[in-house]
Image (tube, helix red, strand yellow):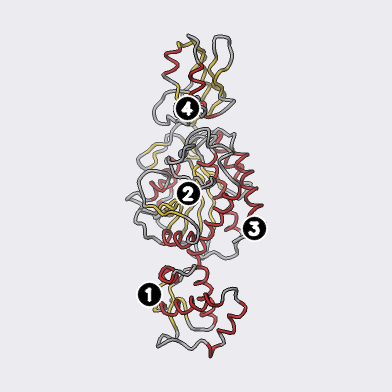
Amino acid sequence: MSSAGQREALGRELYELVRELYPICRSITGDGVRETLQRVSGVVPLERHDVPSGTQVLDWTVPDEWNVRDAWIKNLAGERVVDFRRHNLHLVSYSEPVAPRRISRAELVEHLHSLPAHPDWIPYRTSYYQRTWGFCVSHKQLESLVDPEYEVCVDTRLAPGALSYGECFLPGERDDEILFSAHVCHPSLCNDNLSGIAVAAAVARALAARTARRFSYRFLFIPGTIGSITWLARNRERAARIRGGLTLVCLGDARGFTYKKSFNGDAPIDRAAALALAGQPFEAIDFFPYGYDERQFNSPGFRIPVGSLMRGRHGRFDAYHTSADSLELVQAPQLAAAVDAVLAIVDVLEGDARVRSLAPYGEPQLGRRGIYRALGGESDPEALQLAMLWVLSLADGEHTLVDAAERSGIPFATIRSAATLLERHALIEAS
Ligand code: ZN
């Protein structure tokens, strides 16, 4: 857990990262993804992979690469009334090229998307796997288009290239891995994708700085769906070593945490998340097969227990997939608190152990061993004493420290401290 000053500085740094990444036009492929990975590499070194278009990945195919130079709609006076350069959400992602041409208002409107319920907001739309073109506009903009004809231009390039993703691997004592993934495929949307990218980068940097790691850690910065499918297709053996993980999404808004469980709901990652988030308002929800890349990791062929940590929920907050998911929606302290939450989950995974008592017949006499004196310097000696009794009670070689925290309701960190103290006095050992 970081100090208040450190947390404030971290929040500011992550917000600044979000601000820098915000203008970049990202999609599932293209220069925007690589520019984003490049910038994240300044926080934690990433290895970049470029998988050629046309590559078969599980049941999918890596699509052509998409890049945008410009896109606009001009009125009869020649003014740009809709301009990609003003907001990248104006262009439907993966729009096919359209050479400048005049079209009737009626034809144009068939290619426009707006949100009548939020007349000032621009929606976010994609058309990855069906070739078409379109513009997204505020409903007010749509209503102001009264000329009989307009000129449109979509200066995009859809051509064989690569799907790029970033990866950071941190080896630990064990080959068993914990996976974190963040999607990097949304354009100017802050909470939905940039907050997760920033939090994942900061967690990776913090874990890279640790001198000892029991588990190995893998961080993926990947385009949604096709990115995780591509990674899984290329890494079947590694996938089998993943013991659990999290997708990190929508972590910058004002809401409390929501933890979406893995498919079975009772994996170590699920229990670690519940313990680490206890003590603050959070909601745990069951797995469902839509949302983010947890869908792919939990699919029946893999069944990798990957949960999802978020604040605003997929599709459930007003600003979701609109221009209102902007820099105003994301808050620096919320980003920093999300990093702390993920690290607290990691600490449960790292600190858990199956323990066996070395004095299992009756309660060992703690006073005789000077343990009570050792408690004198502790901040909450009573809680620690109670935690010791719980650990000793469960130390049959079958139960774990996570079991002890769950059954006692005592914070995992206190249970872990108690176990360390008992180990030091040769009363328990890891079994
Ligand atoms: Zn999204």
Q: Where is residue 405, by image quadrant?
A: bottom left
First in sequence, mark 2 or 1: give its number.
2
Measuring 47% from the left and 70% from the top, which residue is drawn there? Answer: 410
Which amino acid does the dot numbered 1 rest on? Glu
Which amino acid does the dot numbered 2 rest on? Met
Which amino acid does the dot numbered 3 rest on? Ala
Who is closer to the viewer here, 28 or 47?
28
Which amino acid does the dot numbered 4 rest on? Val
| Measured Cα–Cα span from mark 2 to mark 1 | 33 Å
Secondary structure at numbered mark 3: helix
Measuring 59% from the left and 37% from the top, which residue is drawn there? Answer: 22
Q: Is mark 3 within 8 Å of ligand 1?
A: no
| Measured Cα–Cα span from mark 3 to mark 1 | 39 Å
First in sequence, mark 3 or 1: give its number.
3
User: Considering the image in quadrants, where does the C terminus appear?
Assistant: bottom left
Q: Which mark is residue 4?
A: 3
Q: Which residue is mark 2?
A: 310
